[in-house]
Amino acid sequence: MDLEEFRALPEWPLILRDSWETNARWWQAGFTEGGDAEYEEQIKPIVREGLRGARRVLDLGGGEGQLARVLARDGADVVVLDSSHAQLVMAHERGSTGVLGTGGSLPFVTGCFDAVLICLVLEHVVELDEVFAEVARVLARGGRFLLLLNHPILQTPGSGFIDDVELGEQYWRLGPYLHQDIQMEEVDASVFVPFVHRPLSEYVNRASAQGLALVHMQEPAPPPGFLARAVEYQEVQAYPRLLVLHFERRS
Ligand SMILES: C[S@@+](CC[C@H](N)C(=O)[O-])C[C@H]1O[C@@H](n2cnc3c(N)ncnc32)[C@H](O)[C@@H]1O
């Protein structure tokens, strides 16, 4: 569905929030506590390195707190904010400090963090401008904003590896990259997650409009532990799944 049409629905915030309440257990079982190779081998090291030395960190959409705990072990004081009650209950059980809220309206005073982390969240968020405005507001001047996304160029809905036996061709098909939309994707048996797609320029330019300047970008290859499980990806190891954007609050 077109993103603007979806946003015109009065019930869109409830649809998105309910989806994560329903799917929190599925996420926790498959992607946390060492269950996912991409987190263990790639995301956690990138987050540690990217936010090295940060002291007051907001993990926005931090879920059950796995990244917050990594940063806390490095000495940071980390607050997890998430819109899902089920995620926060688990965050508390696992030792993180969590706050219920939404990214577009943060319950924190201006300039109180020296870093904000958002990992694999904005693909599920409609109110992008509001979130970036709030990130800029709660960051101190010079503060770091680390954003991790499913790569929006190569992981567009409809994209993927095609092995065309008849034509004898193998290639990576791209979905309709410029079209901003939202789809309920069945990511596992009977597990439906809303995925928002927008082009990369939307992330960079909308962040920039809030005074968040892009200073570095990473497109890592899928890590060995992921490739060992995803046989079909062996053919396309040079196609990144993850995009990492490092911003700094300039004004
Ligand atoms: C894929 S999980 C990622 C969790 C965590 N960042 C991690 O990397 O382990 C996405 C999380 O974003 C949260 N979320 C989605 N929309 C949100 C919003 N508008 N404000 C705050 N949290 C949101 C969901 O509840 C869910 O916990």
Image (cartoon, rainbow, N blue to C red):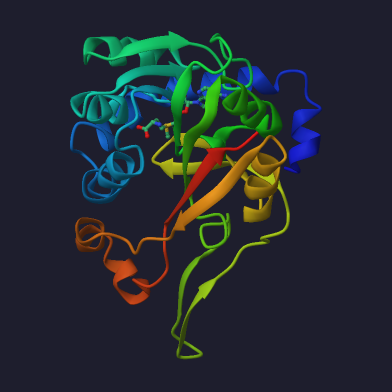
Give the number of marks.
0
Q: Residue at x 32, y 68 (%)?
A: 232
Q: Is residue 35 left or right of residue 136?
A: left
In which image quadrant can residue 11 be found?
A: top right
Q: Quadrant of the C terminus?
A: top right
Q: Nearer the viewer, residue 231 or 153?
A: 153
Q: Is residue 91 left or right of residue 160?
A: left
Q: Residue furthest bottom?
A: 168
Any part of residue 51 in sight:
yes
Residue 145 image point, x, y percent:
49, 36
> Measured along the vertical axis of the image, is residue 186 above or below residue 28?
below
Residue 226 image point, x, y percent:
25, 57
Q: Residue at x 50, y 35 (%)?
A: 193
Any part of residue 60 in sight:
no
In which image quadrant can residue 158 be found?
A: bottom right
Q: Quadrant of the N terminus?
A: top right
Q: Residue at x 21, y 29 (%)?
A: 74
> Measured along the vertical axis of the image, is residue 74 above or below residue 216?
above
Residue 100 image point, x, y percent:
47, 10
Q: Nearer the viewer, residue 183 or 136?
A: 136
In which image quadrant can residue 159 be found?
A: bottom right
Q: Is residue 206 left or right of residue 79?
A: right
Residue 26 image point, x, y percent:
34, 29
